[in-house]
């Protein structure tokens, strides 16, 4: 194996083990054994378990950030939000190990921050959309950060639940999620 191939192999093994057992429950010995290498090879590539974990978390944060950036492009309509929810649930389905790592314990040894920090960043990106929506409903747009946190939290917790449940189908979960959010927002009183 080339050095780059070995690095990718160690990342894949580490990602799987961290998802199954968490940071604390995974040892450098297990990573090395499952990759068929000695412990010094892992140290050579990542400096230790913390270094490997930090790279795994950073990659997952980048994947999730890329998906969420695409979600904010285009018109802000109910079908668009539903498509965005499907995209996010599909990310969770296709990257279950990575999502489990982010949700479980991404603060341990991670340079890129925690899952909570990532969700807060996403909510911050929703602020302008939410401010425009609130203004169109006669509400104070200064409440946008609060509503953004509510919306992102609802999607994030539903995604965590669905990761284990896997029923109903992700398209149905997304449709129901957006139906609840959309109808709740559409019927928002002018005064609160």
Image (tube, grey):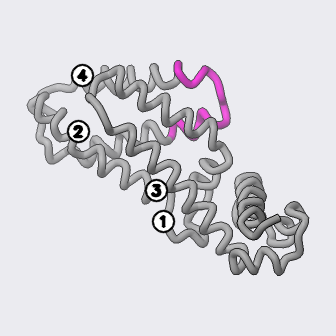
Q: Which residue is mark 3?
A: 116
Nearest-to-viewer mark from 2 and 4? 2
Give the spatial CA distance, label 3 vs label 4.
Answer: 28 Å
Picture quarter containing residue 148? top left
Disc 3 from disc 1: Cα separation = 8 Å
Judging depth in this view, the residue of 7 and 91 nearest the camera is 7
Asked if the residues shown at circle 2 and circle 4 are in contact, with their CB atoms under 8 angstroms apart, the answer is: no
Q: Position of residue 129 (x, y in %)?
A: 23, 39
Of 86 and 145, which appears nearest the observer?
Answer: 86
Q: Relative to 62, is 17 on the left or the right? A: right
On the image, numbered disc 1 is attached to which residue? 113
Q: CA distance from mark 3 to mark 2?
A: 20 Å
**According to the image, label 2 marks what residue?**
130
CA gap, disc 1 to disc 2? 25 Å
Q: Is residue 73 above or below residue 121?
A: above
* Nearer the observer, 4 or 18: 4
SS type, badge 1: loop
Q: Nearer the viewer, residue 51 or 177?
A: 51
Quick one: label 1 or label 2, which is nearer the N terminus?
1
Identify the magenta region.
157-172
Left or right side of 90 for 35: right
User: Does the residue at mark 3 contact the one at mark 2 (Cβ under 8 Å)?
Assistant: no
Q: Identify which residue is drawn at 49% across, 28% down.
A: 86
- The CA distance from mark 4 to mark 1 is 34 Å
Residue shown at the point (30%, 24%) measured from the top left: 184
State the separation of the CA atoms marked 2 and 4: 12 Å
């Amino acid at each position: 194996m080339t050095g780059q191939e070995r690095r990718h192999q160690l990342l894949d093994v580490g990602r799987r083990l961290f998802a199954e057992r968490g940071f604390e429950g995974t040892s450098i010995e297990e990573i090395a054994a499952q990759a068929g290498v000695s412990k010094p090879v892992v140290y050579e590539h990542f400096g230790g378990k913390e270094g490997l974990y930090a790279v795994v978390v950073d990659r997952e944060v980048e994947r999730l950030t890329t998906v969420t950036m695409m979600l904010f492009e285009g018109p802000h309509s109910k079908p668009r939000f539903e498509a965005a929810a499907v995209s996010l649930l599909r990310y969770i389905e296709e990257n279950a190990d990575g999502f489990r790592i982010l949700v479980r314990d991404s603060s341990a040894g991670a340079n890129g921050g925690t899952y909570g920090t990532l969700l807060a960043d996403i909510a911050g990106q929703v602020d302008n959309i939410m401010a425009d929506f609130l203004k169109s409903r006669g509400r104070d747009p200064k409440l946008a950060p609060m509503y953004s946190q509510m919306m992102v939290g609802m999607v994030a917790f539903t995604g965590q639940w669905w990761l284990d449940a896997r029923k109903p189908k992700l398209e149905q979960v997304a449709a129901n999620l957006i139906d609840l959010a959309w109808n709740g927002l559409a019927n928002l009183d002018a005064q609160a």
